[in-house]
Image (cartoon, helix red, strand yellow):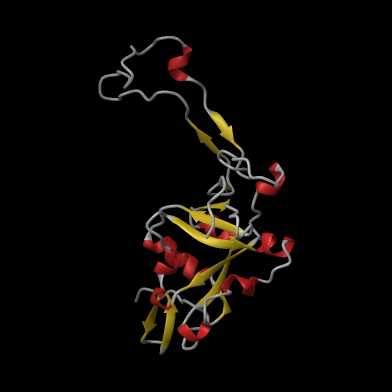
Amino acid sequence: MGPRRPVACGAPSPTERTVRVGTTRDRTNGAHPDGKRPGEPDEMQRPRKTVDPGLADPIAPVSGLSESALTVADEVLLYRRVHPDRTRLDERRGCNRLASAAFTEASHEVSIDLGDALKANGRTPESTLDGFSVDDGWGLVQISAGDARAAGAMVCRNPLDDNPCHGLVVGKLSRSKLIDLCVAARWVIRPKGACDPPHIRVQAQ
C-alpha cells in the first residue's frame, strides 16, 4: 500500500448541521477555559456556521479532483474486502454470516474502493480482490455511501499512489450500526460457505 494523500470526507448524514466555533463556556461558573471573563466582546461568542452536508468537513485538496468530484454521492457503491476471520458461523442458517468486524478497524477508518473511481479508472469491482484468493476464504461485499452515512459514518476519498480508487469509511460506530451495515451489504464475490444475504438481523422474541 502506498503513502496516503490528503483525505476528503463527505458529511456523516444528508441533513444540514450547524457547528459551534470559538471557546466553550464552563456551565458551572460561567468561566471560559481560556481564562477570559464571560461577557467580553464578540470573539468570545462567535456565531455558528452552517456546514454544507454534501461537501467535505472540511474539504482537503486531492490532486486531480475538482471540488465537486470530492463529494461522494449516496448512490456510489463502496467495495470492501472481507477476511474469513470477519465472518461468524450462523447456526440457525447453517452458513457463515458477515460479522460486525467486517466494518471495524482500530483506527475507525475502514478501507474501501469507490465504485465511481473504479469505473473512471477502467477497473471492475472484482479487481478490489486482486491478490486475495477466494480459495483462502476471502470475499468482497458492497454497500452504498448512503448506507454508510445512514449508520453515522463519513465517506472519504483517500487515493493512494498504487490505488487511486481507495477511500475510507470513517467513524466510531456502535455495534448496532455496524450490524446495520452488515444487513445492507451484498456479496460481489461470495466465499464458499457464506450466507446469502450476508446478514439477517434477528428480531427479538
Does 71 sit above or below residue 114? above
The residue at the far left in this view is 28
Q: Residue at x 57, y 48 (%)?
A: 5
Does 173 sit above or below residue 16? below
Q: Position of residue 122 (x, y in %)?
A: 74, 66
Does 112 sit above or below residue 14? below
Q: Position of residue 97 (x, y in %)?
A: 43, 79
Q: Residue at x 70, y 47 (%)?
A: 65
Q: Position of residue 179 (x, y in %)?
A: 43, 67
Q: Position of residue 100 (x, y in %)?
A: 41, 68
Q: Residue at x 62, y 43 (%)?
A: 55
For the question of whether residue 194 can be seen, the reply is: no
The C terminus - image quarter: bottom left
For the question of whether residue 21 can be seen, the reply is: yes
Q: Nearer the viewer, residue 205 or 92?
A: 92
- How many marks the image carries: the answer is 0
Q: Quadrant of residue 175?
A: bottom left
Q: Quadrant of residue 118?
A: bottom right
